Image (cartoon, grey):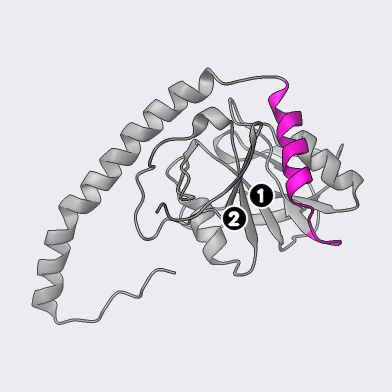
Amino acid sequence: MVAPHPFCQQEPRVTEAKAAAPSDTALRDAKAAARKLARIRRAALINADAPMRLAEALLAHHTPAPGAIIAGYWPMGEEMDPRPLMLALAAGGHRLALPVTPPRGQPLSFRAWAPGAALRAGPMGTSEPLAGDELRPDILLVPLLAFDRAGRRLGYGGGYYDRTLAALPGAKAIGIAYAGQEMPEVPAGPQDFRLPLIATEAGVILCGDPV
């Protein structure tokens, strides 16, 4: 959890903001460079068998509780495809949802979706259910550009999943990626949500702070 910003007098607050700016800029630049590298690396990892192997690896390790609502995503471009996993979950009796992208600065919402149900084009190349009830997911499958063993994740920079997970206490997030998307350390700040679990075609990674 991110600690609340301390209240302070006007002069110290201005001084603190000036001191923090270079650090914020350095982190932003580090993330931009990491995203550029991650996109190049991910493009070389596409494998038609990987999504099914990921589904098998995750379901062998983690079986959602009966009745759990699972929020997946419709893959864009070179993202790891979660649809074999979602189909297996639906066959097991779980309700599925897909994200609906809100205006920038707001958390995602989730709309019920079943295999074969109609989709519509969403913002920024996303696909979202044409119709369906709004659901609160118990488990979220989170697409990644990169990850590390401490659960730090690199997304596209919009902050949608960080805001969404902060608004869903008790929900479990599972990163979905190719094994080759792992980095030694992903640049991250205290506001960036860490994943407890990452699923890849090579197996499941339980994340934690490195020792």
**Circle 1 residues within 10 Å: few <14, some 14–19, many ≥20:** many
Q: Mark 2 points at which residue?
A: 108
Q: Name the residue under label 1.
A: 99
Percent position of residue 191, x then y = 39, 60
Q: Is mark 1 on a helix, strand or loop?
A: strand
Q: Is mark 2 on a helix, strand or loop?
A: loop
Is 9 on the left-hand or right-hand side of 159?
left
Task: Examine the rendering and report whether any part of residue 63 can be seen.
Answer: yes
Q: Which residue is drawn at 80% across and 60% down?
A: 68
Q: Residue at x 78, y 45 (%)?
A: 59
Q: Main secondary structure of the magenta part?
A: helix
Q: Of the residues under marks 1 and 2, which one precedes in the sequence?
A: 1
| Residue extent of the magenta highlight | 49-68
Q: How far apart are marks 1 and 2 (CA)?
A: 6 Å
Residue 142 vs residue 128, the one in the foreground: 142
Q: Mark 2: which amino acid?
A: Leu
Q: Image height check: is 129 above or below 33?
A: below
Task: Examine the rendering and report whether any part of residue 129 can be seen.
Answer: no
Do the numbered discs 1 and 2 sit on residues whose CB atoms are within 8 Å? Answer: yes
Q: Mark 1: which amino acid?
A: Pro
Percent position of residue 158, x then y = 45, 47
Residue 90 vs residue 114, the one in the foreground: 90
Percent position of residue 91, x then y = 91, 44
Percent position of residue 172, x then y = 64, 59
In the image, residue 78 lies in the stretch drawn in magenta: no
